[in-house]
Image: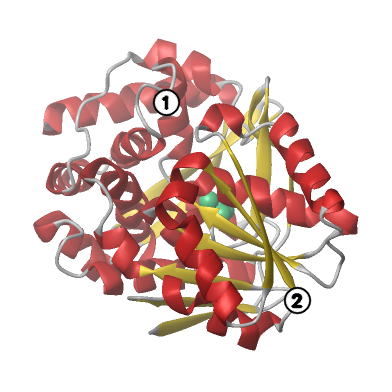
Amino acid sequence: MTNVHIDTSHPYDVLIGPGLLDEAGALMKQAVGLCTAAIVTDSTVDRLYGDRLESSLRAAGYETVRTYFPAGEQHKRLGTLEAILEFLAERHLTRTDVIVALGGGVPGDVAGFAAAVYARGIRFVQVPTTLLAAVDSSVGGKTAVDLAAGKNLAGAFHQPSLVITDTDIMRDLPEALLADGAAEIIKYGVLSDPEMFEWMRNEGWKTKLDEIISRSVQIKRDFVNRDEFDTGLRQQLNLGHTFGHAIEKCSGFRLSHGQSVAIGTAIAAGAAGLEEMVGAILDANRACGLPVDVPYDATTLAASAMNDKKRKGASITLVLPERIGLCRLETIDISLLEDAFTRGIAMVEAAR
Ligand code: GLY
């Protein structure tokens, strides 16, 4: 088992290894002590892993309660949050108890937000069950629900007390869910790990999954430790996301977050004028079953990106690679965003 320690205002460990779901009770007992544990998940994950998690918690001595909401991003809404809060109140959860967020990004974000606001904040443990959640959303304390105006627009920073990542669960995931997580791993490679980038480019995620997860979490730790509240450096974790979110939105969310970020990362390298790197990123995308073409034109994508959360008035901050392993933030006037898309898309098309 690997232990990645996150040194934020509320420090915690991310435990990564095979078979950890069945040890979750014992691991949690060490980190948060015995109390009532409220498992919050979605309908799909509840069916797959709910009983195993609950048995492990009970075997360790926890009182448990459990609730789930329908699976899908469309349920990452205030109505779901309210139902969870009412459930916690009906079961008399107190501030000394703990929520266990079991699932991918949606249950993690919603249950984390419930923990941030229930009784003005209670502890929570993340048990990610997708690769994307394991390498990104379960670590760093961003919790949220979506509003009609956009994704993640209501939320809070609330660090978990522990993250338990069972790598056996990751190995069993369908290819499409692994590919989604792989997009973020390629991103981490471009941000600060040339060796891991080469693994992804040559072999995809398949041969070194446990190590890739640990290294990705270590990279995320390095950004989060230095900028917990996302005021500067942490924004580099948005590499590929401004371009990618525009693609995701234009597709009406038919393209997944990972598929969109994968192509967005290649566009970012193109916008930075790095032709060779665009080719390398497209190789990595191919190796991981991720897309290599841009399905919309620059004008359409730039118009969609105008509403990006990262826009600040008349400017927007882009994450631009300098070389594999090093990126920089560059704030540009919003009027130049379409040019950045045009440059990036042209290079992606030339390199395909
Ligand atoms: N997912 C980007 C971040 O946690 O900052």
2 left or right of 40?
A: left
- Which residue sits at x=28%, y=52%? 173
The quarter of the picture where residue 42 lies is: top right
x then y, percent, for residue 208:
20, 70
- Which residue sits at x=70%, y=80%? 32
233 left or right of 216?
A: right
Write down the residue under mark 2.
35
Type of residue at label 1? Glu
Q: Tell me the SS state at disc 2.
A: loop
The quarter of the picture where residue 62 lies is: bottom right
- Residue 139, can we see it? no
Q: Tell me the SS state at disc 1.
A: helix
Type of residue at label 2? Cys
| 310 or 290: nearer the viewer | 290
Marks 1/2: CA distance?
41 Å
Mark 1 vs mark 2: in front: 2
The circle drawn on residue 248 is 1
Residue extending farthest to the bottom is 30
Rendered-image quadrant of the N terminus: bottom left
